[in-house]
């Protein structure tokens, strides 16, 4: 067992507490650099959203383009952001394993779901678009690049909210105003209005097919904002933390990176997210000299193996891959707490398949985070249908801010 642990450490799959502390410090520094200027590991993209005010009410359509699926729902916001139970879902065109899709096919699938909802003409639309994008002050967003192995050429560099509106209009649907956000900001918005939650101490976290964080930072801390560009005390910032490069990555991570569609990019995401855990497992297996099964690449397979074979070498490897992911996520959350100044408390609004369903994952994140933030009051909670709730909240909050209701 000690020999296996040493070999896992050599592969970068069993970071020590000291290594996690150094990773936390390095990631906090990169987050601050990204808030000050563009071009760093963490893009720190302003999301042009203030914390939703208490008592916000209204109705919106929410559309969620995630890693593998597309969803849509009519969202009724009544203080807590309730969601109607009728949620529609379809495969996401161009997702990993499904082949290349055209832009028309991609956004046409969105319009097809929205049309089936039957919302009144002009209903505002919160578009949860979970890929690196630069959100604009008017609520639209420009796709910077695809991640999660998605293949839809012809969209990078274009306004995705406008493309959605055009697809809706082409389908005979009268679109209302569109506000674009990613899943992390949606989780942040959905979780920040809960009872007893201080939005200033909240972090949105996604750990599923991909990973990311976001928070409502003090406007003054986002030095790259033009003077007077944002009138509120806090602004939601999409960290794009998947682009971080923790200093404790190892040779297995290098191998997975080299074989990916975008070598050199999204190193943190490739170390912790579900889209890559199977690849990490496959890269580590031959180095351990064991006859281990070949996985297709999804985190769910690694989770199942860790639970089914807790004492076998391959089960221990699967558990190490999961635990390393949880530990690195905890280090990133501690770095976020350093940046937002969450002394005394931290509320994590967490979403995604790993944090919600992987055995022991949530508990591991909390245990490691507690060690990194001793004495802090930490909550880690998942909100039901957070991408949809948060999308509806965001478009209504954005409209309220424009009207001056805040």
Image: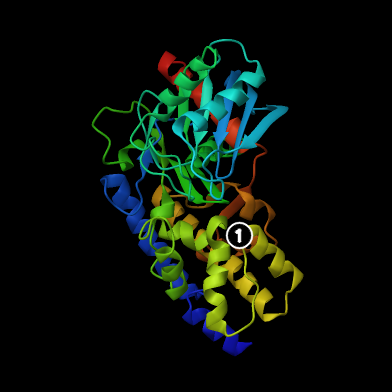
Classed neighbour count for the residue bearing mark 1: other residues with Cα under 10 Å, few (<14), some (14–19), many (≥20)? some
In this rendering, the count of numbered labels is: 1
Report the coloring of the rendering.
rainbow
Q: Mark 1 points at which residue?
A: 366
Residue 358: image quadrant is bottom right
Residue 281 horizontal/vertical position (percent): 57, 70
**Vertical arrangement, residue 187 with respect to residue 1, above or below:** above
How far across and down, in percent of the image, does residue 54 sit? 56, 25
Does residue 76 appear left or right of residue 44 in this picture? right
Image point (46%, 53%), residue name: 337
> Is residue 114 at least partly visible in the picture?
yes
Pick the front one: 13 or 265: 265
What is the quadrant of the N terminus in the image? bottom right
- The secondary structure type at the circle numbered 1 is helix
Residue 324 picture location, percent across and down: 55, 68
Q: Report the residue at 58% width, 89% height from top.
A: 3
Residue 215 position (above or below residue 242): above
Image-quadrant location for residue 243: bottom left
Q: What residue is rendered at 35% in x and 31% in y?
A: 158
Residue found at x 38% / y 62%: 245
Looking at this view, name the residue that lies furthest to the right. Answer: 308
The relative height of residue 160 versus residue 96 in the rendered view (above or below) is: above
């Amino acid at each position: 067992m000690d020999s296996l642990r040493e070999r896992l450490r050599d592969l970068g799959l069993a970071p020590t507490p000291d290594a996690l502390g150094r990773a936390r410090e390095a990631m906090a520094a990169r987050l601050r650099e990204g808030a000050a200027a563009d071009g760093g590991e963490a893009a720190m993209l302003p999301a042009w959203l203030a914390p939703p005010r208490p008592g916000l009410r209204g109705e919106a359509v929410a559309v969620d383009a995630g890693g593998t699926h597309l969803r849509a729902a009519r969202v009724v916001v009544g203080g807590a952001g309730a969601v109607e139970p009728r949620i529609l879902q379809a495969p996401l065109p161009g997702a990993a394993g499904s082949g290349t899709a055209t832009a028309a096919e991609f956004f046409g699938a969105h319009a097809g779901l929205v049309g089936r909802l039957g919302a009144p003409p002009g209903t505002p639309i919160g578009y949860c678009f979970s890929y690196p994008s630069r959100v604009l002050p008017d609520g639209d967003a420009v796709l910077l690049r695809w991640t999660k192995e998605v293949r839809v050429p012809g969209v990078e560099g274009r306004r995705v909210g406008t493309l959605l509106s055009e697809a809706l209009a082409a389908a005979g649907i009268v679109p209302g105003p569109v506000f674009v956000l990613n899943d992390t900001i949606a989780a942040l918005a959905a979780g920040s209005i809960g009872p007893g939650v201080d939005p200033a101490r909240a972090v949105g976290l996604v750990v599923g097919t991909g990973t990311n964080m976001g928070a409502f930072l003090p406007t003054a801390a986002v030095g790259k904002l033009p003077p007077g560009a944002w009138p509120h005390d806090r602004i939601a910032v999409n960290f794009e933390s998947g682009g971080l490069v923790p200093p404790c990555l190892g040779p297995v991570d290098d191998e997975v990176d080299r074989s990916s569609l975008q070598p050199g990019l999204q190193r943190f995401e490739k170390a912790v997210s579900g889209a890559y855990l199977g690849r990490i497992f496959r890269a580590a297996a031959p180095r351990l000299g064991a006859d281990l099964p070949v996985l297709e690449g999804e985190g769910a397979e690694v989770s199942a193996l860790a639970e089914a074979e807790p004492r076998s070498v391959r089960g221990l490897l699967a558990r190490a891959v999961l635990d390393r992911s949880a530990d690195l996520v905890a280090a990133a959350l501690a770095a976020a707490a350093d940046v937002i100044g969450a002394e005394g408390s931290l509320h994590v609004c967490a979403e995604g398949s790993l944090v919600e369903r992987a055995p022991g994952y949530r508990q591991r994140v909390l245990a490691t985070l507690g060690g990194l933030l001793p004495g802090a009051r930490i909550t880690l909670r998942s909100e039901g249908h957070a991408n949809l709730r948060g999308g509806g909240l965001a478009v209504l909050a954005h409209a309220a801010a424009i009207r001056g209701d805040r």
